[in-house]
Image: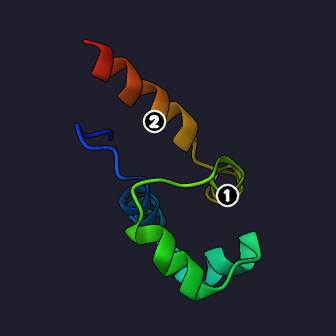
Amino acid sequence: MVTNDMHIGNRIKQVLDEQGRSITWLANKIDCSRENLYKIFKRSWIHTDMLQKISIALNHDFFREYSKWLEKQKA
C-alpha cells in the first residue's frame, strides 16, 4: 500500500515483517550486513541496484509501488 509520503525504508521493513522474515534472513539474501539494513530502513531513498536485490529477495515489486506513487503525485 502506497501512502502520500513514500518512505522506501519503512516500506521495505513493513514488507519484511508482513512476510515474517528476519533482518538476518534478508541480510544474508542480499549479501549485506544487518547494520546496513537498519540504515536502509531509516532512509526515504535507496539506490536502484539495492532496491532490485531487495525486491528479488522479498519477491515484491517496490518499483511498481514507486510508479504508483509517482502517478498519484501528478494528480
Mark 2: few, some, or many residues within 10 Å (few <14, many ≥20)? some
Residue plotted at (38% across, 70% down): 42
The quarter holding residue 33 reads bottom right
Q: Is residue 57 above or below residue 65?
A: below
Q: Which of these two is toward me, 58 or 4? A: 4
List x then y, in percent, for residue 54: 64, 58
- Residue at disc 1, secondary structure: helix
Q: Can you tell which of label 2 and label 1 is closer to the viewer?
A: 1
Mark 1 or mark 2, which is nearer the start of the sequence? 1
Position of residue 30 measured from the top left corner of the image (x, y, whole percent): 73, 70
Q: Which residue is mark 1?
A: 50
Q: For the residue marked with disc 2, what is the amino acid?
A: Glu
Q: Position of residue 31 (x, y in %)?
A: 77, 76
Name the residue: 54% across, 55% down. 46
Q: Is residue 65 left or right of residue 27?
A: left
Dividing the picture into quadrants, the one containing residue 29 is: bottom right
Say which residue appears at 48% left-offset and 76% top-offset. 39
As helix, strand or loop, the secondary structure at mark 2 comes to helix
Tell me the residue that label 2 is attached to. Answer: 65
If the image is split into quadrants, where does the N terminus sit?
top left
So how many labels did they put on this image? Answer: 2
What's the residue type where badge 1 is placed?
Met
Residue located at (46% from left, 35% from top): 66
Task: Identify whether 52 is placed above or below 42.
Answer: above
Q: Residue furthest top?
A: 75
Vertical side of 49 occupied by 67: above or below: above
- How far apart are the alpha carbons under marks 2 and 1? 16 Å
Disc ID at residue 68:
none
